[in-house]
Amino acid sequence: MSHTVIIGNGISGVTAARHIRKRSDDRITIISAETDHFFSRTALMYIYMGHMTYENTKPFEDHFWSKNRIDLMREYVSTIDYAKKTLQFSNGGTLAYDKLILAVGSKPNKFGWPGQDLDGVQGLYSYQDLELLERNTHGPLVKYPVKKKVKRAVLVGGGLIGVEFAEMLMTRDIEVTFLVREDRFWGNVLPKEEGELVARHMIEHHVDLRLNTELAEVIPDENGRAKAIKTKDGETIECQLVGLTAGVSPNVAFLRGGELEIDRGILVDEYLKTNIADVYAIGDCAQMRNPSKGRRPLEQVWYTGRMMGETVGATLTGTPTPYKPGYWFNSAKFFDIEYQTYGTVPARDLDGLSEFYWEHPDGKICIKIVFETATRRFHGINTFGIRMRHERFDKWLNEERSVDHIMEYLADANFDPEFYRKHEKAVVYKFNAEQGTSIIPKKRSWKRIFSIA
Ligand SMILES: Cc1cc2nc3c(=O)[nH]c(=O)nc-3n(C[C@H](O)[C@H](O)[C@H](O)COP(=O)(O)OP(=O)(O)OC[C@H]3O[C@@H](n4cnc5c(N)ncnc54)[C@H](O)[C@@H]3O)c2cc1C
């Protein structure tokens, strides 16, 4: 019986295991150094804030794994002998595989800042990071919290994990100063207006947001614990905790230096195969050699991990299946404001593209639509504070619809609950005024929404 070994029990590894089990009787082993069981990484913040327990974040009962004949091992893989198809564990043990799936995830970025490894400086990625945060911030769940009370934290790097980190700390009355190197929040992803909207919202939530501000160093106290940070402008900010949230990168350090081809992530082809026979890579750690149109080589989000797990599961059970994620989409939350994006909305450099932006007078709801200037073909949309239907935008992108078509049928894409205020009229009114069009927005039609035609 063929033995498939998966390193990593996150969404990608676990999805691969489930799909291999559905389609074969192969022996399957999942190895993780982090936790005994799969849990939802995206729910880490809710454990900290007391909305959920760790047990609540496990999508499967503990008996699911034995019932489905998926062996779980809590080990750290230190090296891999690809010629002998054997893994070596840090405790000295070994395990042989026939096929290997690397699903080893990410790690928080550190950019060599002086003081980045001091006590009281941490990222937020793993379950162990959450435990450390509990200790560092006097969590009610830990026996031995650090003695020093945390009054102020400084977060470094503006992205989604940073916003969650800020929200978490503020539920414990910890003041947050947020250093963002760019001129807007999440500046490598959000265009100017959206970045400014998020920044305003964070300031409303009493985040001390510092744009165009870079960390120079973390300053230790006499016990080697962070007591302040210094910015590149020379300002010193006292703090008792420093959160590093300047993005994540593939967790591949332990795999470097051997035959496995690694760039920023583990290089894979469209079948998620690495350069080594019978070795595949999926999820956050995988870097596509040739990403499909409109997609990036590295995409470190939950649903791409799930899609890759499903794809590799099919390939390894006799149905070679290329990874085809379709058009880009994503969603997130910035405190109270929901964000969605479909297609491509560049943060800068609109090269050959035009944009239309509408913002509600309350400054918390907006839509940005990007289209090709020459053809008016719809390219992508960002929405804040309005929920839109994914399948509708996917359809419009696949049908290569024009921006004018999107405007006419915008109401069909609205996914807000029934009694929410609708904004299509105001949006199209502004669009017509700016574009010289005379589009009359159609009322929402359930018939159209539920028909594929
Ligand atoms: C706080 C937070 C919030 C997030 N929120 C969102 C969100 O709202 N939406 C979204 O789309 N994405 C979100 N993400 C990103 C998302 O969680 C990741 O993209 C996804 O979990 C990655 O899954 P994965 O299976 O690739 O890897 P991981 O979940 O990282 O799993 C990899 C596992 O491999 C283990 N491992 C690594 N090396 C070894 C080794 N040598 N030996 C043994 N085990 C090893 C690791 O310990 C880990 O358990 C969030 C991430 C974080 C940290």
Image (cartoon, rainbow, N blue to C red):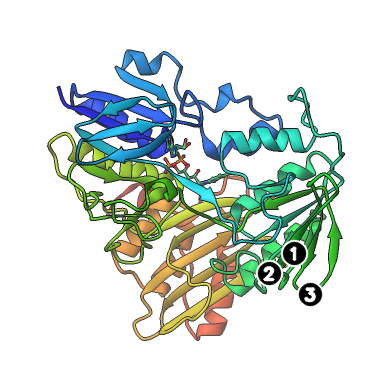
Assess mark 1: CB under 8 A from ligand 1? no
Find disc 3 in the rendering and name its residue.
233
- Residue 196 numbered tag: 2
Asked whether disc 1 touches disc 2, contact meaning CB atoms under 8 Å apart, the reply is: yes
Q: Residue at x 34, y 69 (%)?
A: 401
Q: Nearer the viewer, residue 400 or 339?
A: 339
Task: Residue 329: give x, y in percent of width and height.
Answer: 43, 56
In the picture, measured across the screen, residue 105 lies left or right of residue 361, that is left
Q: Residue at x 62, y 74 (%)?
A: 192
Asked whether disc 1 touches disc 3, contact meaning CB atoms under 8 Å apart, the reply is: no
Q: Nearer the viewer, residue 428 or 200?
A: 200
Q: Nearer the viewer, mark 3 or mark 2?
A: 3
- Residue 200 numbered tag: 1
Task: Residue 101: give x, y in percent of width and height.
Answer: 29, 39
Asked if one can make out residue 363 in the rendered structure from this viewpoint, the answer is: no
In the picture, measured across the screen, residue 154 lies left or right of residue 236, that is left
Q: Secondary structure at mark 2?
A: helix
* Mark 2 neighbour class, 10 Å CA radius: few under 14, some 14 to 19, many 20 or more: some
* Mark 1 neighbour class, 10 Å CA radius: few under 14, some 14 to 19, many 20 or more: some
Q: Nearer the viewer, residue 163 or 327?
A: 163
Mark 1 or mark 3, earlier in chain: 1
Q: Quadrant of residue 400?
A: bottom left
In whole angstroms, how far apart are the C-alphas of marks 3 and 2? 22 Å
Task: Residue 343: give x, y in percent of width and height.
Answer: 41, 64
Assess mark 3: CB under 8 A from ligand 1? no
Assess mark 2: CB under 8 A from ligand 1? no
In whole angstroms, how far apart are the C-alphas of marks 1 and 3? 23 Å
Three-letter code for the amino acid on which mark 3 is drawn? Asp
Three-letter code for the amino acid on which mark 1 is drawn? Arg
Q: Residue at x 23, y 49 (%)?
A: 273
In whole angstroms, how far apart are the C-alphas of marks 1 and 2? 6 Å
